[in-house]
Amino acid sequence: MNPFTFQCGTKMIFGAGTESQVGQELVSFGATKVLLVYGGQSIRRSGLYDRVCSAMTAAGLSWTELAGVVPNPRVSLVREGIRLCKENGVDFLLAVGGGSVIDTCKAISFGYYYPGDVWDLVSHSAQPGDQRLPVGAILTLPAAGSEESDSCVISDEKLKIKGGFGSPLMRPVFSIMNPELTCTLPLYQTACGCMDIMAHAMERYFSRTKNTEVTDRLGEAMMKVIVHNLPKVVENPHDLNARGEIMLAGTFAQNDLTGVGREQDWFNHGLEHQISGFYDIAHGAGLAISFPAWMELTLEKDECVEKVAQYAVRVWGVEMDFAQPRNTAREGIGRLRNMIKSVKLPSTLSEAGIGTERFEEMANNLTDVGKSTCGAFCPMSKEDIVRLLKAMQ
């Protein structure tokens, strides 16, 4: 295990009806003028919007609104949010939604103090400073784990680029998590979110760092929670116990609890950001396509087989074939593919309507035109990435 420092300062408020506490939480963290950020009309139809506004009114708060956040959140809306904050004296950001809404708030919070364009931070042309507007969240879609993570991902719809940045100061100061708010999610969104959660655990789990039993077991637990509970919410979308387990797994899979003390991979997220940057596919759907194909490719390297076989045994209950551990690993990958198909996520790029025309460009972007490799567990060259994309097709 490698040396590490871990600190997660987000206050988690979990349980039914907890959104009613949002006014008092905002006041306790010093808010006076709030920017309320959300996506479309779903929070209005569900009554959540009215409950949040009533709680803020009762707490004596005023607010300005920014609506219209979409999946793969846009930098153009981040810029609009920064403008609204400056014009209205906003001192606190409240995200009501999923990871896209929370990530939009995170980018606004640092862009507010940055003297240049916020895309400089996303593209790493500049580094975030030590000032930010505090962010609070009411989570409605378990997936990204942004409610406790220290990073955000933003897209430039004109450049067709998706990127992200992070800071220890980026974690929300509080997150309200009521599983009831997720019961009306369509199956596709639920399934995409669950794949994102599993991917966050797997990006950390597939590591060559030795002696990581604690975090191995934590990562396996997060994945097994999804494997066990996703079928339950497919059968009964109002199963609050299963919804709650998925919600907690989403948070703990991405707040880096499962990643401390170990080298992490993150190749699949980098590849998926290329795919969704060009084609605007749902993040979880892109990961559902890439991860099984990538895992198959890792089996070409002897040093990767043991960990993939361990994953198959501990997460999927595959019986270990000690004579042929690749067989064990492949059975685990097959069971992951079966889960993906069972919830009607795409298994190939062609199923998602994605062609081959960008393969070379994506591989170049990930490897500095072939000068470097991408990923730590199974370093991927430009040629490897093109070959993988063809296998995903």
Image: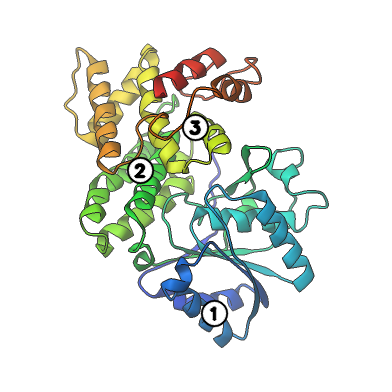
Q: Label 3, on which residue?
A: 264
| Mark 2 or mark 1, whichever is nearer to me | 1
Is residue 354 shown left or right of residue 107? Answer: left
Residue drawn at the location 52% of the way across and 63% of the way down: 40
Is residue 155 shown left or right of residue 226? Answer: right
Q: Residue furthest left?
A: 319
Quadrant of the rendered image containing residue 247: bottom left
| Above or below for 2 versus 302 | below
Residue 52 placement (x, y as % from top left): 51, 76
The Cα atoms of the two marked residues, 2 and 1, are separated by 37 Å
Type of amino acid under label 3: Gln
Residue 333 placement (x, y as % from top left): 29, 27
Residue 202 placement (x, y as % from top left): 40, 35
Find numbered disc 2 in the image and state the secondary structure of the residue it sits on. Answer: helix
The Cα atoms of the two marked residues, 1 and 3, are separated by 41 Å
Q: Which mark is residue 53?
A: 1
Please say whether residue 347 is visible from this viewpoint: yes
Neighbours of disc 2 within 10 Å: few (<14), some (14-19), many (20+): some
Please tell me which of labels 2 and 3 falls first in the chain: 2
Type of amino acid under label 1: Cys
- Residues at circles 2 and 3 in contact by the CB criterion of under 8 Å: no
